[in-house]
Amino acid sequence: MEEIRDVVLEYVIEEYLEDEDEEINYETPLISGGIVDSFSMVSLKRFLEAQYKISIPDEKASPEAFDTVNSITALVREFIG
Amino acid sequence: MSNIGSYEERLKKFDWSIAEQELGYNKGEVINIGWYCSDRICEMGKADKTALIWEGLGGATRRYTFDDIRVKSNKFGAFLRSLGLKNEDRVCLFMDKIPELYIGFLGVLKIGAIAQPLFSAFGDESLHVRLDNAETTAIITQRKHVSKVRRIIEKSSYLKHVIIVDHDGKKPLKDREMTFNMEEYEEPKDFELFPTKAESPSVLHYTSGTTGQPKGVKHVHYSLISQYLTTKWVLDLLEDDIYWCTADPGWVTGTSYGIIGPWSMGITQCVMDVGFSAENWYKFIEKHKVTMWYSAPTAIRSLMKAGDEVVKKHNLSSLRHLASVGEPLNAEAVIWSEKVFGKPFLDTYWQTETGSIMLTNFPGMKIKPGSMGKAFPGITAAVVDTKTFQPIQEVGKIGLIAFKPGWPAMMRTYWNNETTYKSKFTNGWYLPGDRAYIDRDGYFWFVGRDDDVINIGGHLVSPFEVESALLEHEAVAESAVVAKPDEVNMEVVKAFVMLNAGYEADDMLELKIMNFIRKKLSPLAMPQEIEYVKTLPKTRSGKIMRRLLHAKEWGEEIGDTSTLEEDE
């Protein structure tokens, strides 16, 4: 669990964070906070699928499920089994 | 009774002077959108009326009266003048939907400069190309977007001033950067409005075509006449309305109907600067008792997807009138909105170049779900034959949407691109590039684009621009970009990619290419799918046949392939 959320957090910081001074944590709102928009969410989903060799159905990839690193981690764990 | 009253009666007696009279404008006099949206409303006795209710993350709220936006837009104007900026200089507004964007827009117009709003999610290349094309002198931005500006500033030779509206002093400013705080800046005494006239340029919005670079659509201050009257008659705003336009002012809806229309009428509007979620949107409507809601099919379909249960958790009884813009609103969405909100979203059709609503479903009119409705009074609209460019008389026959030029908000040219501007007119008609038909009752029905431009949730993306950017990725040898059907956004970008030798076609490379385009152009332009191919279909002269790839994606007939390369 710890490892997944750290990987996700690092990826979000690396790929989506524009403001160099902004600090985010596991509970920072990503979608509602405007860090990741709905189009970019597709690339984040694709990253998770490639990284963890899983397939996340579109109906599970809701803005709510992708809103924090913690919620994303929970989603990934659901499919890793 | 709606503001428009009887549509048929309005058609009989229509003249744009109706708007001129209501706004107190006489031909030849000064007309400045910045003044009309703030000072005039104050002079009408509404200085203390709320103009803007802004809500950000975590429920943070800021409220401004019309007097506040008058004073603060004057501050913006005075500050820009202190930098030596003057009329017709291009000033880019590159911000999220924060109050400074809305108020700064008026400030730019008040000094006669040209406002160039750009979508803050644009990547480096998209930003650079648009600033360079417009020879933009100043950019107003916020801390979180400064890094993008820094990455392009060395090659942006025209850009002299980078104005940061929320600098906190923690990090030093760099070359050409400065701060401006609209709360703290001293109110200018005797601020002088620049006396713009009807044909003085006001706003420069960028849009994409099939080929070439994005085009800067030039509008003038006289556009106010169309924008005011369409807001009044189509969006049907009333004195006590709380209006919510969900569009970002980086796009034309966000300025024409997210700033100019409502504020020139002295209407209170709400802005939510928070990412999309159905729950947040409904909460926002309930909290602020929104009465008029102007949104987009993409958002409406996303709300549909979130289901009806979440609607029932909120009291949305304040909603009086709903309208939609950006792309055709499908019949299912109209029927759904009637079911869950008790009223349908009324579709409106227009584009960046038209500046204001052209075809629409009017309040009180019989609504045919899925139709774009009828022409706004004063607009001569037709569907013309694709070869003769004569209006089609036959009911239901598909042709090109066409408008007779001359309405007040019509674009005046494409910036530094008069040739392309002229190419938009044929046989005395302005052709927006969409296909449609007219039914026996005179209603317009959208069929599709007449070119390869991809319409993503109402935002146009040029396949050429994406293909050019793809070629800059080290792994890509050749590519073709087409629209792919999408349940929520109508269309999204799909790229067919041929790889250079030594690169393996796998998921991680696909992700890298997607992110490359997202950062370079924008999240909208990022391919949602990349298909690796060994060859691309080309004509014998070497031109990629996007039409074939498009047909494959949409399950359509491939059509004539006689010009296809023999080995394909």
Image: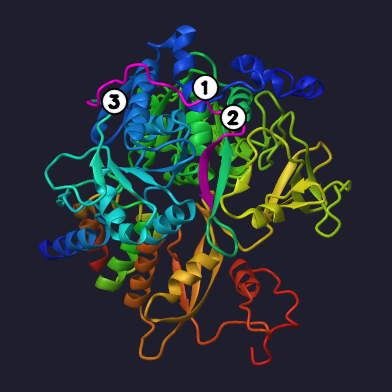
Tell me, yes or no, whether the highlighted magenta stretch contains residue B502: no
How packed mark 1 is, by other alpha carbons closer than 10 Å (few <14, some 14-19, many 20 or more), is many
Place residue B142 in its image quadrant.
top left
Q: Is residue B294 visible in this depiction of the protein?
A: no
| Residue numbers of the magenta segment | B184-207
Cα distance between the residues tagged 1 and 2: 9 Å
Pointer 3 and pointer 1 on the same chain: yes
- Return the residue at label 2: B227
Chain on which label 2 sits:
B
User: Residues at badges 3 and 1 in contact (C-beta under 8 Å)?
Assistant: no
Q: Position of residue B565 (x, y in %)?
A: 67, 88
Residue B204: assigned label? none
Number of callouts in the render?
A: 3
Residue B62: assigned label? 3
The dominant secondary structure in magenta is: loop
Compared with B232, B523 (above or below) is below
Cα distance between the residues tagged 3 and 1: 21 Å
Q: Position of residue A36 (x, y in %)?
A: 31, 53
Cα distance between the residues tagged 3 and 2: 26 Å
Q: Look at 32% across and 17% down and name the residue there.
A: B189
Question: Residue extending furthest right?
Answer: B393
First in residue order: circle 3 vs circle 2? 3
User: Residues at badges 1 and 2 in contact (C-beta under 8 Å)?
Assistant: yes
Please say which color scheme the image uses.
rainbow
Frontmost residue, B258 versus B29: B29
User: Residues at badges 3 and 2 in contact (C-beta under 8 Å)?
Assistant: no
